[in-house]
Amino acid sequence: MGWLFALDCICELFISVRSIPSAANQRFTMPFLHRLLMLPTFSFEIAVVEGVAWWMICRQKRWTTGFGIAASLMYFLMFARPFILGLPDAWEHIGALMVGIIGLLTFVSRGKYPSDKGLFEWLYKRDSPPGLFGKR
C-alpha cells in the first residue's frame, strides 16, 4: 500500500499544479464547497496525506497505522466527491472505492493477528502449505 500512496501522491501533485490556471479563472463563479473539492486544494490535500502515509510506512514510524487509515479514507472521499457535487460521471471512481476498502482492511487489522503483519499476511500464512513457512 505504501508504494501506491507514493505513486498517487505524485499524480495528485501533478493534477494540483495542472489545475491552478483553471482555478484562477473560476475564483468566484462557484460556491465554496465546490471550489474546495474541485480545484487544486483537494488534490493537494490528498497528496499531502498520502505522502505522509508513504513516508511513515517506509520509515516504519509509530503513527503508520493512523496515516494509512487517513490515506485510505481519502480514497473514499475521492469516490464520494462526484456524488457530493452532483457531477455526471459519478461511478468513474469505483477503483478508488476498492483501494480505500483494501487499505482500511489492511491498516485496521494490523497488529490484531498473530503474525503482527495484518489480516492478509496472516490468512496467507494460515492457508499456505505446511512446509512453506516452516513448522506450525
Image (spheres, rainbow, N blue to C red):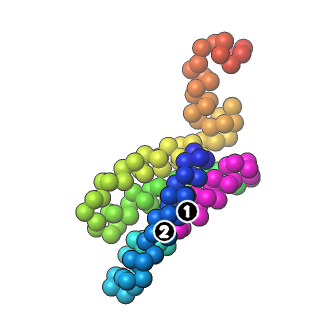
The kind of residue on which mark 1 rests is Ala
Reply yes or no: does residue 51 show up in magenta: yes
The image position of residue 46, as x and y in percent, is 52, 63
* Quarter of the image where one finds residue 110: top right
At 67% from the left and 40% from the top, the residue drawn is 111
Reply yes or no: does residue 57 show up in magenta: yes
Whether residue 59 is visible here, answered yes or no, is: yes
- Of the residues tagged 1 and 2, which is closer to the observer? 2
**Mark 2 residue crowding within 10 angstroms, few (<14) / some (14–19) / many (20+):** many
At 47% from the left and 47% from the top, the residue drawn is 99
Q: Quadrant of the N terminus?
A: top right
In terms of depth relative to the viewer, which is nearer, 71 or 3?
Answer: 3
Q: Is residue 115 left or right of residue 81?
A: right
Residue bearing the label numbered 2: 16
Q: Is residue 77 above or below residue 64?
A: below
In terms of depth relative to the viewer, which is nearer, 5 or 130?
Answer: 5
Magenta region: 44-62
The image position of residue 135, as x and y in percent, is 72, 14
- The image's mark for residue 47 is 1
In terms of depth relative to the viewer, which is nearer, 111 or 13?
Answer: 13
Whether residue 36 is visible here, answered yes or no, is: no
The image position of residue 115, as x and y in percent, is 69, 31
At 55% from the left and 58% from the top, the residue drawn is 9
- The image's mark for residue 55 is none
